[in-house]
Image (cartoon, grey):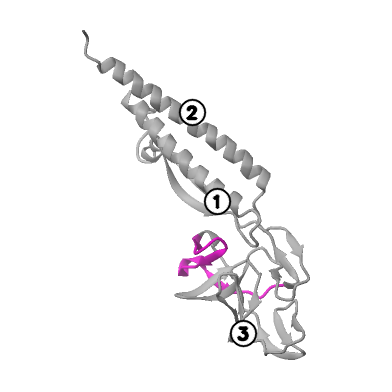
Amino acid sequence: MIRGMYSAATALVVASEQQEVTAHNLAHSSTPGYRERGLVFETFDRVLGRATEPTGDIVGARTVQAYHDFRPGALQQTGHPYDLALGEPDRFFVLAGPDGPIYTRNGCFAPTPQGQLVSQSGYVLQGDGGALNVPQGTNQLVVAADGSVTADGTPLGQLRVVRFTNLQQLTAAGPTLYTAPPEAGLQVAPGRVLQGFREGSNVQPADAMVRLIIGARYYDAAQRALRSLAETIQLNTRPQS
């Protein structure tokens, strides 16, 4: 009976965590450059079974890993000169974060009064030589497919574009921002840059809504099981008159 309560309680926790992640994905289904998030679960008997033969009487589940789905999103043509997209799905723009480089697929940038290009979070877009500065009064900013940037025909530099050998080592620093430890395998890897395009989220809203409904049913089922077990224990422990 207690094992059953423990199983139902951990099922509630797992279902709640899954619902939170699914709701977060759905909320960012229209955010440029967003990558869908997910969770990996496993049962306790599977954990113990790595050392001994599973007995089948160790119940419960837990979250063991969070991950990002780095499949590319659809490209949307905007015609805006400060909207950029990357042609290869494993490339990232580099931003100057408060504690070091930050990486993103969100290519929606805007110029500051000082002429720097910044992300929607206010972080400065980096070129191979540092921040790219657009002179005031520039009439035409051109970002070529190779990442070279010119303002009214004057070269400004080259966009810094990188890739990682192990994407799952990236850590979310915001909805579309990531930091990278050394084991992520940073590599400078110039790729195709598309000016006047933005990459959409890779979340499919309809799929996320279905998962949200299924998750709510899992949560309700676990809640009913826990309530039923608790009521049964109360009946069995009630003093006999």
| Residue at 66 percent of width and 47 percent of height | 205
Mark 3: which secondary structure? loop
| Residues at marks 1 and 2, CA–CA distance in whole angstroms | 22 Å
Mark sitting earlier along the chain (3/2): 3
The stretch drawn in magenta includes residue 172:
yes
Tag 1 residue: 24
| Residues at marks 3 and 1, CA–CA distance in whole angstroms | 34 Å
**Is residue 58 visible from the viewing direction of this image?**
no
* Relative side of 157 to 17, left or right: right
Q: Is residue 82 above or below residue 221?
A: below
For discs 3 and 2, the disc positioned in front in the rendered view: 3
Q: Is residue 207 above or below residue 140?
A: above
For discs 3 and 1, the disc positioned in front in the rendered view: 3
Amino acid type, callout 1: His
Tag 3 residue: 113
Q: Position of residue 1 (x, y in %)?
A: 33, 23
- Region rendered in magenta: 169-192
Residue 87 appears in which quarter of the rendering? Answer: bottom right
Tag 2 residue: 221
Few, some or many residues within 10 Å of mark 2 (<14, 14–19, 20+): some
